[in-house]
Image (tube, rainbow, N blue to C red):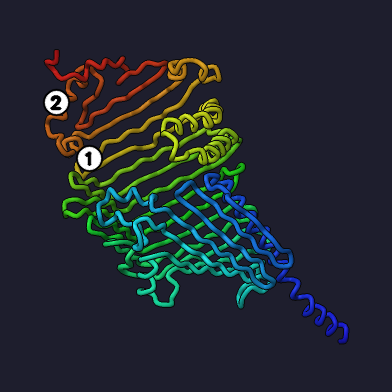
Amino acid sequence: MKKIFGAAAILVLLYPVAPWLMGFALEQRVDGFTEQGLLMTPQLQIVRKARQGFLTSDEDSSYELGPTLKVARHYHRGWYSSVDEATIEISHGAFGALAAAGPAATTPPTGDSDAAPFRVSLRTVIRHGPFCGWSCFALAGADTHVTFSGALQASMTRLFGNQEPIKISGRFPFLGGVSGKLSSPAFVHAQVGRGVSLSSGGFDSTMHSGAHQDWYDMAASAPSLRVEGAKGALAIDGMSLEVRGKRVLRTLYEGDSVMTMKRLGVTGAEAAQQFAVNDLAMANQNHAQDGFMSASYQLGGGTIVTQSVTLSSAHVDVTWRHLGLEPLASLLDATRAAGPQQNAAVAPAVRTQAMMTVLTQPLQALLLEQPEMQIDRVSLATAQGQGQVTGLVRLIGVSAADFQGPPALLMGKLDVKLDLSIDEAFLMSLPGAAASALTQLQPLIDQGYITRSNGVLRTQILFRGGQSTLNGKPFNPAALRPTGHS
C-alpha cells in the first residue's frame, strides 16, 4: 500500500512537468505549421522573427505580402498554457477593386477612415495536455477569440453583445496534426461599410490534418449569405464544401473536392439587372498512379437566369491526363517561388517576363511528358435544345529541340480534335440569333464544313500537323464571308 501511495505521490509531484513538456512539443509543432504555410505561400515574406526564454518563452514575428497584407504575431509559451496573438492587417488599397461597384462599396470595411487598414485580431489560448479540458485528452486544446476593426466590430457587438460572433476551437493530437471547428451564429444586417450590410444564416465547419500536414480534410456548410448595398445585392443559399487531400510529392496533393450552392444570385440597382444560378456545383478529383497524375474538373449549374437569356443548364467538364508528378510538383514550386517577384511597383511587362523566366523550364519538362486535355463536355442548354463540345487536346512526339526553335515547330506537334453539335432550336433561342444565324452558317453547310441533319448542326474540327480541317475538309477562311462579298 505504501508503494502505491508513494507512486501516486511521485506522479502528482511530476505532473507539473508534463504540461511543460507538452507546451514545448506544441511550440515545435506550431513552428512546423508556420514553415509549411510559408512553403505553400512563399509570397508571404518573413520580416522579423525573434524568440527568447527556455522554461517559458516569447516569440515575436511579422510577415508581409507586399504592401497589401501584414501579419504581426506574438507567441507566449507558459507552463500550463500558451497564448498566440496575431493581427492581420489588410491595406485600404486591397479594396480598391470594389470601387467599380459604386459609392456604396468604395469605403473599406473599417468605417473609420478612407485610408485606414482593415484589421482582424485573433487571440488563441492554448491549454497544454495531457488533460487539456473536461473532455480533452491530447497534446493541447485551443480556443480562439476573433475581433475586427471599425464598423464591422461595432456592428457585431450590437448584434451579439458579449456572445462570440465567430467560435474557433482546436485540438492537437499526441501523434501529430491538428483538428478544429469554426462556427458562427446567424445574424442580419451587420454593417461592414458605409451603406453595405452583411447577413448570414450561420456557418459551421470542421477540419483535420495529419502529422507534417501529409493529409487533410475539411467540411463546411452555410445556409445563407447576403451582402446588400445601394448598388445591388449578392445572395448565396445552401452552400456546402468538402475537401480531402493526401500529399504525393512536396506541396503536391491528390484528393477530391466539391462545392455546391442551391442558388447564387446577383441583383443590380435596377430590377432588370440580375444574374442567378440554381444548383451550382464545382468539383475536382486528382489521382496519382505510376508517376503520373490525372485531374478532372467539373463545373455545372441548373437554371441560369440573366437579363437577356434563361438557360436550363450549363456544364464545363475537363480532364487532364498524363501529368508527370515530378514536373508538376516542380512547376508548382516554381510558381510559388515566383510569387514574391510579382511586385506591383514593377511594370507588368517586366513582371510577366520574370514569371516566364522562372516557369519556362518546369513547364517544358511537364510538356515533354505529353499530357492530354480531354474535353468531356462543354455545353449550354435552353428549353429548346442544347449546344455541346467534346474533344481532345494533346502534344504528340514533342522533344526538347521543339522548344529551342520557332513556335511553328511546337505547333506542328499539337493535335486537336473537337466535336461540335448545336440543336437548331437552341441556336434560334439565343438572343439576337433569329433566322439570320442559319443564313450566316449556310455557306459552311453548302461546302460541307457543317452537317445539317434532323434539326442538328454538327462538325468535327481537327488540327494536326499544323493543318486544320472541318468535317475532314481543309478549312478555307473565305468560306466565312457572306454571300456576295467581294
**Type of amino acid under label 1:** Gly
Q: Residue furthest top?
A: 486
SS of the residue under disc 1: strand
Q: Residue under circle 2?
A: 439
What residue is rendered at 51% in x and 43% in y? Answer: 286
What crowding class fits label 2: few (fewer than 14 Cα within 10 Å), some (14-19), or many (20 or more)? Answer: few
Residue 385 circle label: 1
Q: Quadrant of the C terminus?
A: top left
Marks 2 and 1 sit apart, C-alpha to C-alpha, by 19 Å
Q: Quadrant of the N terminus?
A: bottom right
Counting from the top left corner in percent of width and height, residue 426 is at 20, 38
From the top left corner, tell me how far across and down residue 331 is, in percent. 54, 35
Along the line of sight, which residue is nearer the eye, 456 or 262?
262
Report the side of 346 relative to 199 (left or right): right
Residue 294 visible in the shown view: no
Image-based side of 235 in relation to 269, left or right: right
Q: Residue at x 55, y 47 (%)?
A: 45
